[in-house]
Amino acid sequence: MSQPPTRRHLLRLAAGTAAAAPLLYPIPAAARTASTSSTATPLAGTPAHVPSTAAPAAVPATWAVHPFPLDQVTLGDGVFRRKRDLMLDYARAYPADRILAVFRANAGLDTRGARPPGGWETADGNLRGHYGGHFLTLVSQAYADTREAALKTKLDQLVAALGECQQALAEHGSPKPSHPGYLAAYPETQFILLESYTTYPTIWAPYYTCHKIMRGLLDAYTLAGNAQALAIASKMGDWVHSRLGRLPKAQLERMWSIYIAGEYGGMNEVLADLHALTGRAEHLAAARCFDNTSLLEACAGDRDILEGRHANQHIPQFTGYVRLFDHTGDEKYAAAARNFWHMVAGPRTYSLGGTGQGEMFRARNAIAATLGDNNAETCATYNMLKLSRQLFFHEPDPAYMDHYERGLTNHILASRRDAASTVSPEVTYFVGMGPGVVREYDNTGTCCGGTGMENHTKYQDSVYFRSADGNAVYVNLYLASTLRLPERGLVIEQASSYPAEGVRTLTFREGGGTLDLKLRVPSWATAGFTVAVNGVRQQAQAMPGSYLTLSRNWRRGDRVTASAPYRLRVERALDDPTVQSLFHGPVLLVARSRETAFRQFSFYRDFTLRGDLADAVRPEGRPQHFTTHGLTLAPFHIADDAAYHAYFRRTEPVVVFGASDSGVANRARGDGLTFLDVLWEQAPFATSARFVDAVRAVADVWLSEGLFTRSERDRVVAAAGAANLRR
């Protein structure tokens, strides 16, 4: 199939000639009691069913695990807080009037001389308004985290102005919308054109922009207690139902199959969330209008038809299906979301935790074949983490959190430039995985600029969860942070230097009582995971890729220390095992080099009996920096303008043990693994004799499969015997 133009590509062309935390958190107490002028007097015509004050939506009975509100988890010192603070400065400083300019212009109101942000957010841009929705979420999250009065004032100003725009459009819009709930930064024309199957780029994803605005409004309500935001969103939901509820199912399905024009973000999710707050049957019915039936049914049946589809057009649909399962009990929705996650999280995920090439899903397992400068759209990782989180609420499978940690640490954390700016979010769009690429930042007004604003002000949202019965706390991520459980009088502080290596300590600062503490044992923790309580080592077995449970009557001052030593390790591309990435524990290491061809690395010659990459990759002197083959390896989350290699070519041409060279080619079997790969997977070896025995056993297999001649087998075994490798 021909490659459609990406939105990022069109943005570049335009430049040459002239792109939330889930609902259902309990509403923070401070938000419920906050005094705001915008919530005191609801928008004229507010439906009677909309609450006049914020109230939490019920957590679904289908959830085995619940999140904590943002304001119950506080980030401690470290790189996550530093990145967050950079985005907080942007949230504080960026003018609300610039965000509102496109909305006011469309409603015929005074723009107050403000210029739109730029990028795709321009006076004539076909996606204008989406960035304002993201900005609402940014400020809502920032306020929920910091409780800064100035942020609340800015948020209330934004919501009140959007209410004015919605009312102005209803009263004297030109053209007048079909329903008084309509709110956008452009006329209703795009939505009308979509219903006649108009394609991109004539129109740009109108329901995508609608989703971002509605999501931002619901976040303003759930995170900051702005009741007017819920009133505006509820009327928007009524408008959506009025447009789509009358259309035949076949027409809807054809609309959602259109590349980008039919992209609707998470409209099904936000409408389901709106229904949870309003109880309106119309809002749930509107959510079900967004069933993308052919893909939904394929994924429910575990049929992978993702190749060639736009990644971020479809990922958020499945978060919506999870929410529809919560409301309808239709297992098809849940099965589709689970299966879709497995189609992406393993076979289509690069080492940093991102997916896609040029915004598109490629063939299953096509990793090495798709490396370039346009991999891993940051929006897609944002949405895959949301989906992972939602699935975990239903089934606390550690695999979801392993994926979450990978994407958060190696993509999201790496996506914010390590430099201050109050005029740009300074975040990435694509993150190239090819050799010698450079990260590009800024992205004011693009989709990834919008999700990027959100990413860095909600780091704490998945550090801890609690069981549905409230008797267990899950420690999912080892970020420096403090968890407050006021209903139990508990304050738990986690001291951690993550993502750097070190011991993580959880201290019960206040309160106590019977509680199961569930510590995630990451899948990468193959060098051991040890736990001590008040200095006494616990005998509980810790399996990588599981949770270790400590059941105890906790008391103030109790300390839990968890240690998971980092090891250097490689991960092989699924389609070419010679193309590899290097990790230090959970941290992706990249080689600093401007070469545009794969760098070739050989490690086995330097191995000792312990079979550890630490024998071949040396510490450089700075934390988590190493050297190999004359190159510096650095953590990818250090976000600068240096060219890098996230993958390298592993070349081990000859079977050699230290200085003992057999002269025999290191041949690969059918799955691409070589003789030395298979041998060293058995390390460490207790003695030289056991090492030689292992060499002999693998060499015999290679002989039996025709990969070695008898003479070659004997030369390999002889070389092993002469190697005299040290421990």
Image (cartoon, grey):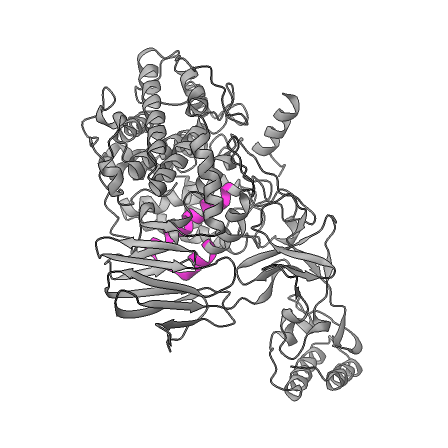
Task: Please state the horizontal and vertical placement of residue 377, each as a whole percent of the image.
Answer: 55, 42
> Could you tell me if residue 182 is visible in this image?
no
Q: Quadrant of residue 518?
A: bottom left
User: Is 86 inside the magenta-drawn segment?
Assistant: no
Residue drawn where x is 26% and y is 58% of the image: 490
The foreground one among 385 and 142 is 142
Residue drawn where x is 66% and y is 71% of the image: 615
Q: Which quadrant does the C terminus fall into?
A: bottom right
Q: Which residues are magenta?
A: 379-404
User: Is 385 inside the magenta-drawn segment?
Assistant: yes
448 up-or-down from 720: above or below = above
Task: Please state the horizontal and vertical placement of residue 565, each as a whole percent of the image.
Answer: 51, 68
Count the marks: how many? 0
Left or right side of 681 for 198: left
Magenta residues, dominant SS class: helix
693 up-or-down from 16: above or below = below
